[in-house]
Amino acid sequence: MHKILIIILMLFGFVSKNLFAEELQAKVTVLAARVNTTVDRKIFATLQTQLNNLMNNRKWGNDVFKQNEKIQCSFILNIESIIETNLYKASLTIQAARPVFNASYQAALVNYVDQEVVFKYVEFQPIEFNENRVQGTDAGAANLTAIFAFYAYTILGLDYDSFAPKTGETFFRKAQNIVNNAPEGKSIAGWRVFDGLRNRYWLNENMINSRYNILHDIIYTYYRAGLDKMIENENEARSNMLQALTQLNAFNRENPNTMMLQFFMQGKSIELIGVFKKGSIDEKSKVTEILAVLDVVNASKYKQELQ
């Protein structure tokens, strides 16, 4: 009887674990080489462990994710200075990718550096996120978890959009809730409309603005109708990716200098060159012309590689 009970409990534990499987497979790294401090440096190792636990052990949505469906992502928190006791200034590099259908290739969803990370941390303080109390009781401490949660929801929104248009909206709205209720305090920035043109506010605004709905179609076409079809029908896949870039170019003409354009194009040059190198002369000519506008930094690279 005991053996049967144990087996039932083990099976229940297995089912429960999979039923509530978390969505992210994240690696958080905390770097503090630039910081001159007399504080015991194990504090940064403790922070790293706590952030990894936050990102990997929290359920961010309602859907069930199998182990092989988890979104691969990494966060590098590079602490640059100590503003005052326990208050740090840092940058955060966020990278996330999704698997391409029938391939071992991981296509980048996010490759971005957030330069406006200010947070308060005392070793072993709780690192938790409550979407109903984003501001928390201490703005400096809450800002760190708010930023990480914001990018978790943004990554999930982009991942969902890449499989079906507009299906990421639930997560973009959750990210919007963080923006609307973001901590306020000394040196905290990146959440407000007047904090610049490239920040968390504008990234989220671009994804929830109904005038920009075409962006969700572009994301879907690029990934699902494009990259995911490369094995099945390479020519059709490349044509769909060219269509997505053409739509993005038209969007950019109507809405110049949006945050999402830079965000979408970041880190895609090698991928795009690899796809279009095998394209027709006409495709190479069209995509080179488009990318010279959409990705100015790499314009000469596209011209050289796609001649």
Image: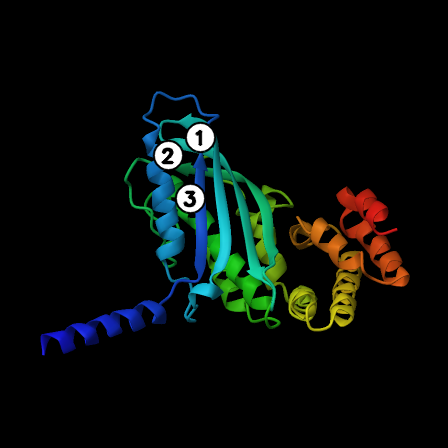
Residue extending furthest toward the front: 3
**Helix, strand or loop status at disc 3:** helix
In percent of width and height, residue 266 lies at 66, 49
Quadrant where the N terminus sits is: bottom left
User: Is there any visible trace of residue 180 in the rendered image?
Assistant: no
The foreground one among 243 and 101 is 101
- How busy is the neighbourhood of tag 1: few (under 14 within 10 Å), some, or many (20 plus)? some
**Residue 227 appears in the rendering:** yes
Residue 228 quadrant: bottom right
The answer to whether 15 appears left or right of 236 in the picture is left
- Contact flag, marks 3 and 2 (Cβ < 8 Å): no
Do the CB atoms of the residues marked 1 and 2 lie less than 8 Å apart? yes
Mark 1–mark 2 Cα distance, whole angstroms, equals 7 Å
- Other residues around mark 3 within 10 Å, as few (<14) / some (14–19) / many (≥20): many
Q: Amino acid at mark 2?
A: Phe
Q: What residue is pinned by disc 3?
A: 144
Is 82 in front, or is 159?
Answer: 159
Label number found at residue 44: 2
Above or below — where is 120 with respect to 262? above
CA gap between label 1 and label 3 equals 16 Å
Residue located beneath label 1 in the image: 32
